[in-house]
Amino acid sequence: MHLGYSLKGIQCLSCHSPHGSSRKALVRESLHEPFAHKECGECHDRKDKGPGICFQCHDEMESAFYTNHNHLLAGVGNPCVSCHSPHASDGKALLVGKEGYLCQRCHGYTYERIEEALYVHPKWDRCTDCHSPHGSNKLAMLHEDENRLCARCHETQGKFTHPVGEKFRDPRNGQPITCVTCHDPMGTMFKYNLKRSGDRDLCIQCHKSY
């Protein structure tokens, strides 16, 4: 028992640093407010055991989760604690690990692709530069439409004459032509993160008459 609550299934390292801390009892540097004030009942005594517990205080996050694409996963219980510690952490926002590590735990296949690729996006380990960690109405939980998102960094490449957008469709699948129609930001075997060789193979996917 700890402060009146069972420690069954709780690891010591979830609250304490094994090496050092400026806090008493080697408690980690960043503390969840209820934990810091020993107000455990603020979370543990609530009837709701899902993300609703967190939304009671972090109501600004609720709208981010209730979007078309989000991290409210069936069968997970409270997905918030998959990434954030409810007690203490040495990371910002009470994250239980570095960003790349957190995402890799569930998105292992994507990381395998990155490891095998010859050309990868320079920000491959900073997932939240492009993806919202909580939810988004955009595909793949992107912060905004693909073309606008890419143009944030690729300003010069954002000015080109190849048709893109809703009015122009990929003849293979009927989807709008965007940056990722030709490029794969997760990594590929071809220069510029192209999905196929830029010499000819990529172009003839749509321009078959050539």
Image (cartoon, grey):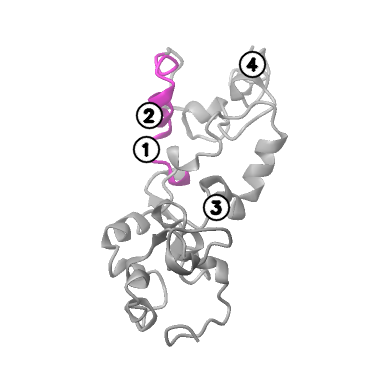
- Badge 1 amino acid: Glu
Give coordinates of residue 132: x percent, y percent: 41, 46
- The residue sitting at the right extreme is 116
As drawn, the label of residue 79 is none
Closer mark to the observer between disc 3 and disc 4: 3
Q: Quadrant of the C terminus?
A: top right
As drawn, the label of residue 198 is 4
In whole angstroms, how far apart are the C-alphas of marks 2 and 4? 23 Å
Residue 120 visible to an observer of this rendering:
yes
In whole angstroms, how far apart are the C-alphas of marks 3 and 4? 34 Å
Give coordinates of residue 153: x percent, y percent: 42, 24
Front residue of 162/28: it is: 28
For mark 3, give the secondary structure: helix
Q: Please tell me which residue is depicted at 30% across the width and 62% down the height of the picture.
A: 58
Label 4 neighbour load within 10 Å: few <14, some 14-19, many 20+: some
Image side of residue 11 versus residue 159, left or right: right
- Badge 3 amino acid: Leu
The residue wearing badge 2 is 148
As drawn, the label of residue 144 is 1
- N-terminal label among 2 and 4: 2
Q: Are marks 1 and 2 in contact (CB under 8 Å)?
A: yes
Q: Please tell me which residue is depicted at 72% across the width and 35% down the height of the picture.
A: 116
Magenta stretch bounds: 140-159
